[in-house]
Amino acid sequence: MYRAFFRVWAFLILEFHVMAVLLWWNGNHYAYTSVPLCHALLCLVEQLAGLWTQRASDRGIRVHGGPLSGAHALGFLQWLAVLVVMVLVMMAQISDWWVFGTYTIWWWVAAGYSGLVVAHAVLSTRDGHQVSFTHSVAGVFRRWQRSSACFGWFWAPWAWVWEFLGASSARPPPREHLAPYDLHTGWGTHLSNIVFWAVVLGMKLAFDWFAVMRTLEPAILGLYNRGWLRNSDSGHADGDIILCIARCLPAALTMFNDTQIFYYVTVGMFGWLKGLVQLNLGRAVGAACDASAPAGSHSATSSFGSMTRSVTGSGDLARARGPNERGQLSHTERLLESTRELVKQQSLEANKVRTYLDGDRVTQWLLFSDVWNAVVEDLRDVDLLTNAERDNLVFVHLESDPSIEIVSGMRPFMLPIIFYGGQIQRALERPGVDSGQRVGLSEMRALLCWLLLQLRVLDRAQCDALLEFQPLDAPLDLEHRTSRLRAAALVSELLKTVQRVQAGAPDELG
């Protein structure tokens, strides 16, 4: 975790360095070669920071940056030697001092270092983790040493050299510390992760270059060339560099913190693609259309479709079915048949209003509820919803038997609980009742009356009286308002008590 955190900041510093070189010293080869020098300096600082943070580690624990007497301190000495050699070679070329003449060896050193860094990153990367390149090469030499067919004695010195170089490796074996499992994620997941971060960093680099650095160019050139803090005629020792650094600080802070913005944007993009393309959240719509009449989705939602004819009693599904044959029907077909029975029973009653049970409206609602529930289940399968949230969002289908007595205003499904909860809350908070609240409250009243009728708590006459009762839109006076508030509080307390009873364990209730 420490190395990953440090290397993120090292990457941001290196990004700012590269963009500054391309912006203000474009065409200067020494400025270009300062980038690998900055990389070596950051690697040395990483070793030094690890050495300092682990200076008091327990003996025997192999961590990156152990005390000077341990093997891990060799990494600090190695990177110090690399940095010193690179600085000396660059200074020798700048001062035209070289024992072999005017040979430009610094260009070759910088190019070789950059190539080794890239090659090391490619060769040491595996699916989901990185391995120690030196340990891997030493392991190959050790296997050749143990094989008599490969002249084993010849590879022993080579294995020792690579093991010596790998003694300071910061990469332990790719295994978990809490469980003995390899850190393999699969190349498909690894390549997907690479594509994801390529998109994130591509957006970040484009924003940093065009929106941050390019807008900073004229301000820095104006500060550096104006000579506000001039100390000499040459300009090399001027204090204007302090003003330039102060002017660059806001841009640097922006570049250090804007990665998370593009990370969230890319996560949202990948989520949309996964939901719309891979999960195909609309597949339930296609399945419903495929199961309908040959005319397609139009016949599934129009008054001429086979499903609607089953509701009105003119289709093939309208014929009587036995218990065994009914169990073989699909979920939607059973709902449609139950709806047909509801329509039939209510049509026999005189002067009964069949709310939402006329024409093809019920068929459309049933198809929509099937698709809606399938989408909610898909979201629950990918763990974007909890069980409680799923229960509050799904339609509840009521498959009533034809022999069961129904009440006026029922339909074979209930809207999601979140709809009823919102309507009740609005009805309690506002004095008036609009059409949406009236529909929700009427449906809840019909379902409650039907439940009380089935439980024999009410008889048919009492149930009809409750269904025909029309409450007042607003309280008559202050006493009436107080009574309503007291009744609502008592009902709320009753519901909380029932919830506590249901949530309690059996031994707690005894």
Image (spheres, rainbow, N blue to C red):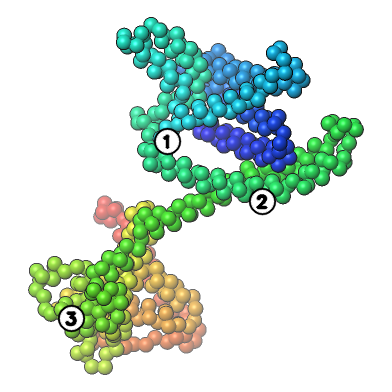
Residue 427: x percent and y percent?
45, 77
Question: Could you give the CA–CA distance between mark 1 and mark 3, rounded to whole angstroms?
Answer: 58 Å
* 440 in relation to 370, above or below: below
Quarter-of-image position of residue 47:
top right
Q: Which residue is mark 3?
A: 315
* Residue plotted at (53% across, 14% down): 70
Instruction: Judge whether residue 340 can be spotted in this image.
Output: no
* Residue plotted at (78% across, 47% down): 219
Say the numbered circle drawn on residue 211. Answer: 2
Residue 119: x percent and y percent?
51, 28
Instruction: Judge whether residue 153 can be spotted in this image.
Output: yes
Where disc 2 sits, the SS reads: helix
Q: Earlier in the sequence, mark 1 or mark 2?
A: 1
296 left or right, relative to 132 = left
Say the numbered circle drawn on residue 49. Answer: none
279 left or right, relative to 215 = left
Residue that lies at the very extreme toward the bottom in this rendered image: 351
Residue contact at pointers 1 and 3, CB within 8 angstroms: no
The amino acid type, in three-letter code, at marker 3 is Gly
Quarter-of-image position of residue 82:
top right
The amino acid type, in three-letter code, at marker 2 is Ala
509 and 142: which is toward the camera: 142
Q: Which residue is mark 1?
A: 128
Where disc 3 sits, the SS reads: loop
* 38 in relation to 244, above or below: above
Of labels 2 and 3, the one closer to you: 2
